[in-house]
Structures are given as structure tokens and as C-alpha cells.
Amino acid sequence: MLYYALVFFIIAIIAAVFGFGGIAAGAAGIAKILFFLFLVIFIVTLLMGVVRR
């Protein structure tokens, strides 16, 4: 999931360089959502691992 967030971030940067503002904003929004989703899942699994011990 972090990989896809990075891919959408790269797409957003490339689109912004070439002047495609709408595509860049959409890709950046998707990247941000995927990154925060990754963080939530990571923290939940980390806490589950600590609680199990």
C-alpha cells in the first residue's frame, strides 16, 4: 500500500511539472489517502503485536 502511495505521489509530481493541475491534484489526494490508510493499518498491527505479548 505504501508502494502505491509513492507511485501516485510520483504521478502527481510529473503531472504538476507538465501543467496538468487537475490530474496532479487527484493523484496527490489518492496518495495522501493511501499513506494515511497505511499508517492506520501499521499502528493497529503494531498495537496488536504488543498486546499479544
Image (spheres, helix red, strand yellow):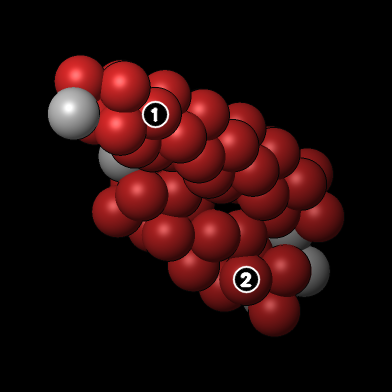
Q: Is residue 17 above or below residue 46?
A: below
Instruction: Say which residue appears at 46% left-offset and 34% top-offset.
Output: 43
Is 23 in front, or is 5?
5
Horizontal and vertical percent position of residue 31: 56, 45
Q: Which residue is mark 2?
A: 13
Residue where numbered disc 1 is placed: 47
**Callout 1, which amino acid?**
Leu
**Could you tell me residue 40's position as x and y percent?**
51, 29
Task: From the viewer's side, name the closer residue of 18 and 43.
Answer: 43
Horizontal side of residue 5 vs 16, given as left or right: left
**Residue 19 shows in the view:** yes
Residue 22: quarter of image: top right
Q: Nearer the viewer, residue 48 or 5?
A: 48
Image quarter where the N terminus lies is top left
Q: Secondary structure at mark 1?
A: helix
Q: Is residue 13 above or below residue 23?
A: below
Q: Is residue 41 left or right of residue 35?
A: left
Q: Where does residue 5 sit, x and y in percent of width and height?
A: 44, 49
Compared to residue 42, the image places residue 10 above or below, namely below
Residue at point 62% right, 71% down? 13
Mark 1–mark 2 distance (CA, rounded to whole Å): 34 Å
- Inspect the image, locate mark 2, and give the three-letter code of the amino acid beneath it: Ile
Query: Crowding near pointer 1: few (<14 within 10 Å), some, many (20+)?
Result: few
Q: Nearer the viewer, mark 1 or mark 2?
A: 1
